[in-house]
Structures are given as structure tokens and as C-alpha cells.
Image: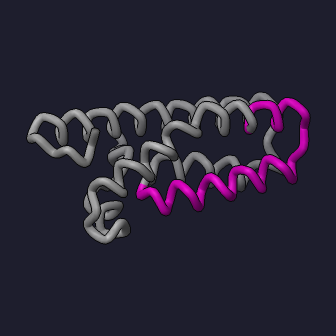
Amino acid sequence: MTTHRPSPFQRDELLERMMGNVEMMHRMLGKFVAAAPEVCDLLESTVRLGDAEAIASCAHRQKGAAQTMAAPCVADCAAKLEQRATTASTAELLALVEEFRDAHRALQSAWAAECDASCAVGNPASA
């Protein structure tokens, strides 16, 4: 049985949050995607230091940001990290951080495809 994975981001939902402004959607999602490597590295470092409170706090912030950006896969991974921060082993948490990185990579690919599609139809807002 295959499991259904949601799209890396829900375009219509995000566009509605941005009041229909495609340029703002691209700008905000672009900033979120650009910050991902640093956030992932911070989470990994925090896990390696064993600071459960900091892991939970960072994961909680990322969950909220991902929900705002209509990025359910990233939000789900952040929620798992937040929930397991105090109970999982370092190895389990590092595996969750890698899952979080993978979700961000999928989001980055979806965002790039969105930008390419906007450019292909002559939308100057994506430039």
C-alpha cells in the first residue's frame, strides 16, 4: 500500500494568504526556501548538542512558518521533531532532521517549478 504525500506546497492556499499577489507569494516562499539550509543546520547542531528544549522551540517555529507558507510536508516534519524532542534518541532525531531537509528540498524543487511555469507564461512577477 502506498501512502499519499501531500504536495510540497499548496499553491492556491498560499496565494489566498498573499491576497492573490503572485509576486508577494514568490518573494515570501523564496525567502522561506532560501533560509532552509541554515535552519536545517541549526536543528542538526542543536540535536547534536542534546538541547531538547531548543530543538522543540526551533521545530515549533519552523512548523508555524511552514504552515503559514502552506508547506504541509515541512510542517509535518517540524511537528515530529517538536513532539519527539524530549523522548527520541539522538540518532532518531538526526533521522528526523534529515527528513526535514528532504521536505525542504522537495519544497525548493516545487517552488523552482512554480517560478519556471510563471516565467514560461510571461509573468514578470516571478523574475
Q: Residue furthest left?
A: 121
Q: Nearer the viewer, residue 104 or 87?
A: 104
Q: What is the x, y in percent for residue 122?
A: 11, 41
The answer to if 86 sits in the magenta stretch is no
Q: Residue at x 41, y 34 (%)?
A: 108
Q: Residue at x 77, y 56 (%)?
A: 57
Q: Is residue 108 above or below residue 70?
A: above
Q: Which residues are magenta?
A: 43-70
Q: Is residue 67 above or below residue 62?
A: below
Q: Quick one: quadrant of the C terminus?
A: top left
Per the picture, the main secondary structure of the magenta-coloured stretch is: helix
Q: What is the x, y in percent for residue 113?
A: 26, 34
Q: Quick one: quadrant of the N terminus?
A: top left
Quadrant in the rendering for residue 61:
bottom right
Q: Is residue 103 above or below residue 28?
A: above
Q: Is residue 1 visible?
A: no
